[in-house]
């Protein structure tokens, strides 16, 4: 199974893209999104790490 990696930021081409976590409720499920450390662009929020990465990469408009 290929390892999913975050692609560089589509806005500033920065490579400092991290997978961030947020929790809407104290006891709620975690939600994940990619965030660029350079321009603070955020990717789509997803309920899993995997889809947060996939959605971010798709946001670039390129084939994965
Ligand atoms: Zn950026």
Image (cartoon, rainbow, N blue to C red):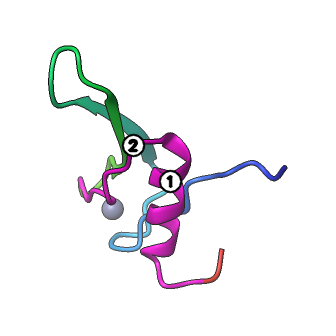
Taking the magenta stretch, the answer to whether it contains residue 52 is: yes
x and y, in percent, of residue 24 in the image = 16, 31
Please give left or right for residue 3 compared with residue 41 in the image.
Answer: right
Q: Which residues are magenta?
A: 40-62
Q: Residue at x 55, y 54 (%)?
A: 6
How far apart marks 2 and 1 lie (CA) works out to 7 Å
Q: Which mark is residue 38?
A: none
Q: Residue at x 50, y 41 (%)?
A: 49
- Number of numbered labels in the structure image: 2
Please give left or right for residue 44 compared with residue 7 in the image.
Answer: left
The reply to whether residue 10 is in sight is: yes
- Quadrant where the C terminus is found in the figure: bottom right
The residue pinned by badge 1 equals 51
Q: Nearer the viewer, residue 23 or 7?
A: 23
x and y, in percent, of residue 56 in the image = 44, 63
Q: Residue at x 81, y 53 (%)?
A: 2
x and y, in percent, of residue 18 in the image = 43, 42
Disc 2 element:
loop
């Amino acid at each position: 199974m290929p390892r999913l990696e975050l692609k560089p930021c589509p806005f500033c081409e920065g490579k400092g893209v991290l997978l961030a976590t947020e929790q809407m409720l104290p006891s709620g499920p975690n939600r994940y999104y990619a965030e660029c450390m350079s321009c603070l662009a955020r990717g789509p929020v997803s309920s899993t790490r995997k889809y947060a990465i996939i959605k971010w990469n798709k946001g670039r408009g390129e084939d994965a």
